[in-house]
Amino acid sequence: MIEINLEIAGLPDKGSVYKRSAARGIAFRDGKLLVIHTDKGDYKFPGGGVEPGESLEQALGREMLEEAGYELTEISCLWGVAHERRRGRTADILEMDSYYFLCQVGDTQIPLRLDDYEAAEHFAPVWLELDKALHANKNLVDDTQPWLQREIAVMERLREDLASQ
């Protein structure tokens, strides 16, 4: 299993900490990766936070339906985890573990069920070549989208894994 550690420099030594786990899907079809595109021009893996009482796999299935509109049909394996430590919005520090699963989704897409912030950012699922998503994200890195560092690191490692196969 792949492990990626990301810590933003300049975090306070003390302060409140919010811990969260998330499940994210890595799904390929015809050489293209399922990603979520936003109005900021970035691409992210479909997925999100684990709700109380949910397993990682249940959260991934729910998030895949909500954000991408596809039913999760198979989870092949847990590919890796990205450990993040960065500035939080509801606490001084956010510590998030994002678990990435290799998975398959069905062929039929249903209407999305986006959260308010997701709708405001115009989340749209697209099938895109990994290199194109990675290139777009690298050109957008800024402090207003802290998740970009995580998605770039995961996409780079995924590209390495695919090249070695």
Image (cartoon, rainbow, N blue to C red):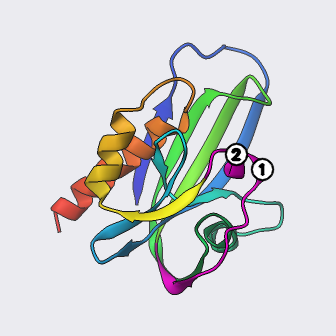
SS category of the residue bearing label 1: helix
Q: Quadrant of residue 64?
A: bottom right
Residue at numbered disc 1: 116
SS category of the residue bearing label 2: helix
Q: Among all residues in the image, which is located at the extreme left?
A: 164
Q: Residue at x 63, y 43 (%)?
A: 96
Residue at numbered disc 2: 120
Q: Position of residue 135 (x, y in %)?
A: 29, 43
> Tag count in the figure?
2
Of the pair 46 and 120, the residue shown nearer to us: 120
- In the image, is residue 124 above or below residue 7? below
Say if mark 1 contacts mark 2, CB within 8 Å.
yes
Q: Quadrant of residue 63?
A: bottom right
The magenta-colored residue range is 103-122
Q: Which label was assigned to residue 55?
A: none
Q: Is residue 127 left or right of residue 130?
A: right
Q: Position of residue 18 (x, y in %)?
A: 76, 36
Three-letter code, disc 2: Ala
